[in-house]
Amino acid sequence: MRVLYVSKAMTTGAYRDKLHELAAQIELRAVAPRRWGGQPADAVAQDQPWMQLVAAAFPGHNHFHVYRRPARFFENRPDLVHIDEEPYSAVTGQLARECRQRNVPFVFFAWQNIVKRIPQPFLALRGYVFRQACGAIAGTAEAAAVLRAWGWTGPLAVIPQVGVDARRFRPDPAKRAAMRARLRMGNATFVIGYGGRLVREKGVHLLVQALRALPAARLVLLGDGPARPALESAAREAGLRDRVLFKGSVPAGEMADWLPALDTLVLPSLTTPGWKEQFGRILVEAMACGVPVVGSSSGEIPRVIGDAGIVVSEGDSGALSAALDSLEASPALRATLGERGRARVLDKYTNERIARDTVCFYRSLLEGATA
């Protein structure tokens, strides 16, 4: 089976791990923009012969970007095209047209977990893609429900597209000790972590508030964003500045070094009228490292965590403080949840599992087309 996989997400080298697993099962060609926004894509490694970086127009714009000369992507005559983009994105419509001209079946992907009004011309693009696609992959059950609500009636698989390499993301006492020494937190009794963008909807301000009730705890923020100045000000005003470390952005490839240093990882996201947490990749990365997780009830977080962590009502800083207090007070609870988290990742969220389920869906579509 020859598959063409097109995805802007693959500009990030760490996200290509899933493609390694796909390439072990099928004949793969993957394409991504040469640049995304103002940054060049990560270089193609020697063990990624299937990866190609190409020129794109409007790189950095999720739903507006398109590729230059996409006809060249079809030189190896793929049996199937996987367009790793929302059905209303310009690039999905562009590649759907190329597939139709060559009579090549394609699937699209969807993360969107809120039924939104889609304006023109994106509404027309979505309709065109729905008419032409042979299948769809949704990252979550909520995203699948949105596709059905929008009128998609074709084959649909729910496959979490965010996997982890459990050989890199794993409990590692040596990394833990080294990183805590680097952070000068070797003697800290309880280190709380957050990883992601510092924006209001991620609820990080609630985490800073919760820290007030945990006098022995330290907080490490792995990320950056427009909310950082307000968070720094809030930490100073609460007398917490010496207990909150703003590390700044951490490359995706380095997260496996940072996470083992934590005693817990928190994702306190807040639902807004236009957004709710679509997945929470940082959760499965922390769980793979044996780090117990706490998450809010926003979007997909409760289903990602399952029984392998603690879920609190979003926006409830008191409940968040109580959950963290229980973890701080009980190393045994932390160990139990850490073990459950790693087991859950090995069962559901490895790149191997995601690649296997994806190839199975590909085969079902191609077999159905020839039946």
Image (cartoon, helix red, strand yellow):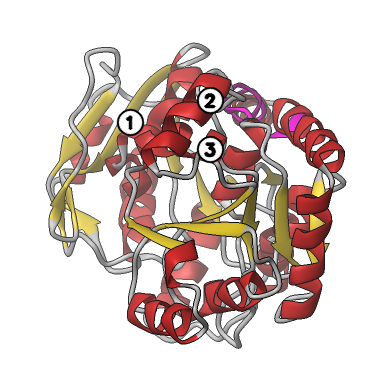
Of 208 and 25, which appears nearest the observer?
Answer: 208
Element under disc 1? strand
Quadrant of the rendered structure where residue 351 is?
Answer: top right
Q: Compared with residue 305, is residue 244 higher up or lower down, i.e. above or below?
A: below
Q: Residues within 10 Å of mark 2 (few under 14, many from 20)?
A: many
Going from N to C along the chain, the mark reached first, 2 or 1, is 1
Q: Residue at x 15, y 52 (%)?
A: 39
Q: Verify CB contact (< 8 Å) between mark 2 and mark 3.
A: no
Please identify the residue farthest to the front as the structure is shown: 187
Q: Residues within 10 Å of mark 3 (few under 14, many from 20)?
A: many
Q: Position of residue 286 (x, y in %)?
A: 60, 40
Cα separation, mark 2 vs mark 3, equals: 18 Å
Q: Residue at x 58, y 45 (%)?
A: 134
**Residue 30: which numbered mark, if any?**
1
**Residue 261: which numbered mark, if any?**
3
Quadrant of the rendered structure where residue 91 is?
Answer: bottom left
Q: Residue at x 78, y 41 (%)?
A: 334
Q: Compared with residue 238, is residue 52 higher up or lower down, i.e. above or below?
A: above
Please state the extent of the stretch shown in magenta in the rendering. 347-357
Amino acid on which disc 2 is placed:
Asp
List the residue tagged with mark 2.
Answer: 165
Cα separation, mark 2 vs mark 1, equals: 19 Å
Amino acid on which disc 1 is placed:
Ala
Q: Compared with residue 139, is residue 29 higher up or lower down, i.e. above or below?
A: above
Q: Position of residue 44 (x, y in %)?
A: 21, 26
Q: Position of residue 322 (x, y in %)?
A: 82, 68
